[in-house]
């Protein structure tokens, strides 16, 4: 009995080990440059730093121009000066050049102000990014997360492994929470839970994307219909106001027979314009209906494509798992 229990326990351990090996490690990466470019505080501070750098460069170039003028003046007057004056001016020029070079190194050198201030600027945001990455890794069970912008050479990285948008979302959440009321914080937390669920389930995220696209297409059709109704209402109001104005004019006797005659002759034109507006409205409705059908067809095709890709991926994963189990069994057989 004890031997049977021991055999069952060892078999259970072996199966769990094989499943862990077949699952493999979960990898992800971020693009630090992309994240920094989309953080408003960093962008604003970077612009200010670039303005400082331009100012320093202008000072250095101005100093160089002044030194070149002194050199040209010495070259033109050299034949008229004594050796002592020439040596004095050359010493002054050499001093100014060294001073300008030292200033350039101070501002743009390897340990200059520009590099140091860039480090000070990036460091707090990097700390926030690292904290966000650690939270995402723990929540979604990532084994490794790399930085695409680092010295690590990445010859290829599939877009589905990029979690930069998730990191940006975490950073924006932290910044926005400080400005929200308690009720808004509860609504935000509910929305964040939904976003986290989408992050942990790619298939659900694709489905949500299709639903959002379908909703956007439906809202676009409704907006077009509303705009068309407002246009028809405006045309009707203009026509009604014109009729009331004509009645008032006739009642007051301020319209001559010729004007009345012109009004009678223009009536058919008004009818024609109203008919034309109605035809245009019908055409717009038909176009909107065709656009809606086209959008629905596109959403259906996208959903079909996503389901096909998901089915193909499941088949590939099953095949890979089956192959790994076969290789493991073969290896165990050879060892035995």
Image (spheres, rainbow, N blue to C red):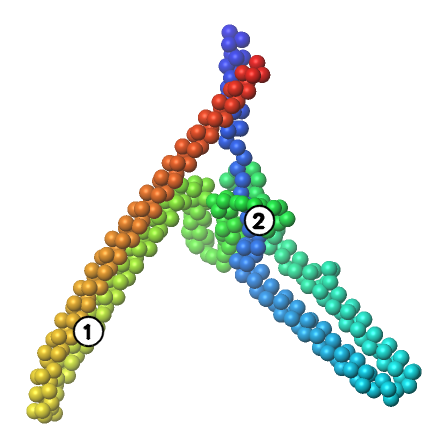
Neighbour tally class for label 2: few under 14, some 14-19, many 20 plus, Cα within 10 Å: some
The numbered dot on residue 148 is 2
The answer to which quarter of the image holds residue 50 is: bottom right
Residue 7 falls left or right of residue 304:
right
Can residue 68 be seen from the camera position used here? yes
Tell me: 320 left or right of 273. Answer: right
Q: From the viewer's perspective, is 208 left or right of 251?
A: right
Q: Residue at x 77, y 72 (%)?
A: 100
Whether residues under marks 1 and 2 lie with C-beta atoms below 8 angstroms apart, the answer is no
Farthest top residue? 1
Marks 1 and 2, the one that precedes in the sequence: 2
The circle drawn on residue 288 is none
Relative to 336, is 252 on the left or the right? left
Q: Secondary structure at mark 1?
A: helix
* Residue 74 image position (x, y, % from top left): 82, 83
Q: Is residue 129 above or below residue 315?
A: below
Image quadrant in which the C terminus is located: top right
Residue in view at x 43 percent, y 42 percent: 202
Q: Which mark is residue 235?
A: 1
Q: How many marks?
A: 2
């Amino acid at each position: 009995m004890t031997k049977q229990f021991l055999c069952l326990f060892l078999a259970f351990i072996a199966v769990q080990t094989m499943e862990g090996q077949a699952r493999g490690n979960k990898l992800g990466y971020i693009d630090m440059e992309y994240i920094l470019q989309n953080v408003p505080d960093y962008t604003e501070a970077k612009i200010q730093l670039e303005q400082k750098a331009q100012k320093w460069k202008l000072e250095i170039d101005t100093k160089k121009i002044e030194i070149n003028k002194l050199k040209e003046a010495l070259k033109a007057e050299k034949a008229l000066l004594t050796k002592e004056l020439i040596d004095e001016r050359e010493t002054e020029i050499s001093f100014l050049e060294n001073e300008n070079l030292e200033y350039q190194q101070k501002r743009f050198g390897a340990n200059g102000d520009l590099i140091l201030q860039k480090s000070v600027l990036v460091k707090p945001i990097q700390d926030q990014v690292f904290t966000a990455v650690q939270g995402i890794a723990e929540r979604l069970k990532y084994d490794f997360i790399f930085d695409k912008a680092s010295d690590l050479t990445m010859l290829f990285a599939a877009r589905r492994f990029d979690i930069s948008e998730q990191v940006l979302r975490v950073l924006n959440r932290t910044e926005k929470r400080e400005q929200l009321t308690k009720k808004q914080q509860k609504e935000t937390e509910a929305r964040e839970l939904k976003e986290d669920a989408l992050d942990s389930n790619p298939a659900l995220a694709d489905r949500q994307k299709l639903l959002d696209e379908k909703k956007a297409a439906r809202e676009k059709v409704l907006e077009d219909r509303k705009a068309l109704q407002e246009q028809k209402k405006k045309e009707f109001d203009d026509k009604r106001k014109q009729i009331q104005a004509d009645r008032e004019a006739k009642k007051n006797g301020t319209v001559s027979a010729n004007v009345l005659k012109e009004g009678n002759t223009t009536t058919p034109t008004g009818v024609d314009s109203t008919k034309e507006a109605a035809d245009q409205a019908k055409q717009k409705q038909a176009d909107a209906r065709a656009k809606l059908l086209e959008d629905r067809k596109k959403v259906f095709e996208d959903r079909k494509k996503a389901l096909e890709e998901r089915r193909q991926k499941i088949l590939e994963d099953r095949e890979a798992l089956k192959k790994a189990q076969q290789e493991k069994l073969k290896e165990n057989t050879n060892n035995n």
